[in-house]
Amino acid sequence: MAYSEKVVDHYEHPRNVGSLDKAAENVGTGVVGAPECGDVMKLQIQVDQATGKITDAKFKTFGCGSAIASSSLATEWVKGKTVDEALQIKNTDIVNELSLPPVKIHCSVLAEDAIRSAIADYKKKNQPAEAATA
Amino acid sequence: MQPNPFELLNVPMKFDVDAKALHRAFVAQSAANHPDRFVDPLDQADAADRSAAINKAYLTLKNPFDRASAMIALLADTPIADSKQLPPNLLMEMMEIREALEDAQASQNQAELDRLKQWADEQEKEYIQAIAEALNTAMALPASDRSQPLNKATEQLNALRYIQRMLEEFSE
């Protein structure tokens, strides 16, 4: 099976590889995995707390080319979006953009899970005081 | 429903299989079902199908991971509800250890590489041991009472996949 050009491009030149300070208040971290294949993916977002906009995103993925490409693309897409806009990203968008074959769809699911998990972590750290006590 | 690989090889279902006995059973079943033993073309075709199934069953039972997966499916009364469950914190731990491995590979730190390899080897052994125990427990129980040990076996099996994936890094 051949990877699409876009997958190869993200795999050879992954965007936004690295880590953000996971202890920081304005950073949300999501670590997800796929037991089918043993891939692990970490996606982090840095959020402007005043506007709710994602100003930076980093990822680290130990897995196949499609998993790396999916998470690389995910970091590109979330940057500049608000956290609520980023939640609208669907794994099918990633599948379409990267032309992933059916056997690699779970890689895009992993990337979507990673975005959601990072946002959930950020929201947990930054929930309004009234919501926290409610 | 997958065919039962233990039945295909005519060996008792258990996790702790003896590799040599398994191979003997495989050879015996392969010989008995070899297409060349049959004259009628329809019998030959059936024998070819059985031979293919026997080959597949042998590969499944030879590999501890696949053997455990097959046993969980065979022993479960109903499918495992949460088949993706993992021990708590495993993903975070794997992420950190994979980052450490990546650093050690980049800096060619052999002592650290050896330490990580040893860690992963030990983890693999521990998980396989835990899976064996959970499956043995499940087998001793009536089908309706097996969900707890089978859930445990599933969780340990999922964790093992991450360790095996890490170990592949050392064989490249």
Image (cartoon, rainbow, N blue to C red):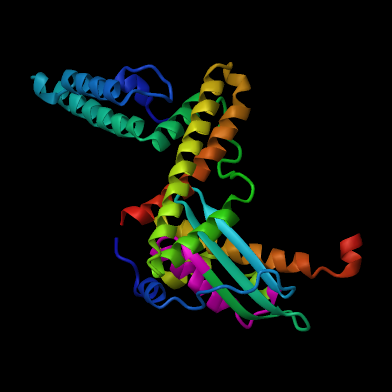
| Residue shown at the point (64%, 66%) measured from the top left | A29
Q: What stretch is highlighted in magenta?
A: A60-84
Q: Position of residue A106 (x, y in %)?
A: 48, 56
Residue A89 visible to an observer of this rendering: no
Q: Where is residue A75 in the image (x, y as percent from the top left)?
A: 55, 75
Looking at the image, which is closer to me, A79 or B43?
A: A79
Residue A49 visible to an observer of this rendering: yes
Quadrant, the C terminus of chain A: bottom right
| Residue shown at the point (58%, 50%) measured from the top left | B90
Q: Is residue B73 left or right of residue A112?
A: left
Looking at the image, which is closer to me, B172 or A61?
A: B172
Any magenta on residue B77? no
Residue positioned most to the front: B111
* Picture quadrant where residue A103 is located: bottom left
Looking at the image, which is closer to me, A79 or B159?
A: B159
Q: In this view, does A5 lie to the left or right of B100?
A: left
Q: Where is residue B117 in the image (x, y as percent from the top left)?
A: 42, 51
| Residue shown at the point (30%, 26%) measured from the top left | B19
Main SS of the magenta part reads helix
Q: Where is residue B142 in the image (x, y as percent from the top left)?
A: 58, 16
- In the rendered image of this protein, does residue B38 appear above or below residue B169? above
State how many labels appear: 0
